[in-house]
Image (tube, rainbow, N blue to C red):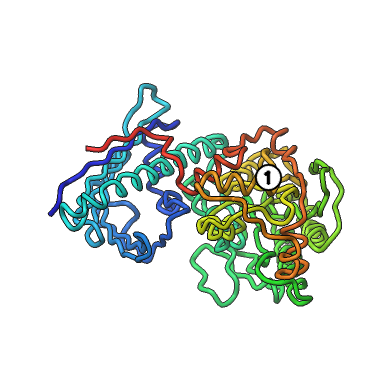
Amino acid sequence: MGKSHVFDARSQMPVPPADLFSWHAREGALERLTPPWETTKVVERTGNGIHTGSRVVIEAHLGPIPQRFVSEHTGYVEGQSFQDTMVQGPFSKWVHNHLMQPASTPQASVLEDQVEYVLPAGALGDTFGGGYARKRLERMFAYRHTLTREDLRRHAEFASQGPLTIAVSAATGMVGQALVPFLTTGGHRVKRLVRGGRKVAPGDVAWAPDKGEIDTAALEGVDAVVHLSGANVAGKRWTPEYQDEILKSRTETTRVLCEALARLPRKPQVLVSASAIGYYGDRGEESLTESSPSGEGLLAKVAREWEAATAPAEAAGIRVVHLRIGVVMDPRGSALAKFLPAFNAGMGGPIGSGQQWFSWVAMEDILGLIRFAIGNPAVRGPMNGVAPGVLRQGDLAKTVGRVLHRPSFFPTPAPLVRAAFGQMGEEALLAGAKVVPVVAQTHGYTFLFPELEGALRFSLGRTTGGAEFRHT
């Protein structure tokens, strides 16, 4: 066996140790703590959460090769600590201690992660893999500590409202997969809307919106609803059939859901229904706020009808928020996932002229805006889900290149975009809209990532700030 190494990460958290421990003990904590740049999935769980004897099987990639980690929880001390011990995996030894300690003030705590590990292949593994392992640990725990601190802060803002029961549609989509663990680790109960043909877990809601069917009784007692359903706009060329699918996947699901909510004897307090900045169309240099009129094109038409489909819920007295989401910059999907291969290959650059405005938002701010819309009764109607730091497409390319240390001057000409993608390329890639988040900022929302470079460095693991590290 090779040399034993100890990695230690420490940082202060804005809640007492017991609350910090509770966050880690809730369903979804592992999903929240998994960095978005890692290709990792949970294959199996046994036992009771993080209690001693529980196990989790994870499939992860170390380079191009998938590896299975089998980890067993040990050392569970309520409110103070727990431990993960690798019983199968690529390391010769891996023991991770999670410690929640008192801070200098009673309303704060210190999170300490101690990892004792031994690399495979003895001295050879240390020589060729030691530096890589240390850097990877720093990237991972910088992300984990920053995310934990910000989650605790955001949930504390609405702690006086208590735990809520929240229904979520499209919970397996890109935003839904991030939103559900964000809510559950905050102490809320989530009821997933599950389409017909899939297994419905206890507490979830079966529905078949294409048939106009939904288990209305299963929605009883819901405090809030987050509606995210809709076919991928950039999924393929916009044939007439796919244009119809883009529209109906939004309007029909929204109508079926809102009619069901309106029938409930005890209605939810709020519906946060996704919309899109496509509502505004291609608007050149105009600054667009929530009061700006809708524009031209398919995306504008879809967004108008999508928002109009919530009318049954509004008529029933439910507070409705239309979250007009910008381009979500997250490596697990959306535009960033499509950009990255070209940039990593050194072939990235602007699309078209590069002068069109690009209104984007970090995944963590979409989650924050949804929680803000649920918790703030003054927010209703349209709310732009975009970061304040809107930038031109050419500046986007330069920023991605700078973060990745890759060239960013290989343009994709507009005629090529039109030839390859047709109308979708014209509206989704070559058009631009300078969208401003007036409602969110007016009501006091604080963006975690107001500028693109910070968002990219966080979501791609290109920063080691956020915690104190020690290697021994």
Looking at the rendering, in which quadrant would you find the N terminus? Answer: bottom left
In the image, taking residue 53 as reference, residue 423 lies left or right, namely right
Q: Is residue 254 visible?
A: yes
Image quarter where the C terminus lies is top left
> Residue furthest toward the top?
104
Q: Which residue is mark 1?
A: 386
Q: Residues within 10 Å of mark 1 (few under 14, many from 20)?
A: many
Depth order, front residue of 287/289: 287
Q: Decide which of 12, 199 is in the foreground and name it.
A: 12
Give the percent coordinates (x, y) of residue 338. 58, 60
Q: Residue furthest left?
A: 1
| Element class at badge 1 | loop
**Which percent across, then down, holds residue 397?**
62, 49
Residue 247, located in which quarter of the rendered image?
bottom right
Residue 86 as seen in the image, left or right of residue 432: left
User: What residue do we see at 68% from left, 73% from top?
Assistant: 213
Compared with 8, 253 (above or below) is below
Q: Residue at x 31, y 40 (%)?
A: 113
Residue closer to the observer: 90 or 164: 90
User: Foreground: 24 or 3?
Assistant: 3
Q: Position of residue 273 (x, y in %)?
A: 70, 54
**Number of numbered labels in the structure image:** 1
Residue at 29 percent across and 52 percent down: it is: 51
Give the amino acid type for the residue marked by disc 1 in the picture: Val
Task: Work out whether 147 lies above or below 409.
Answer: above
Q: Quadrant of residue 58?
A: bottom left
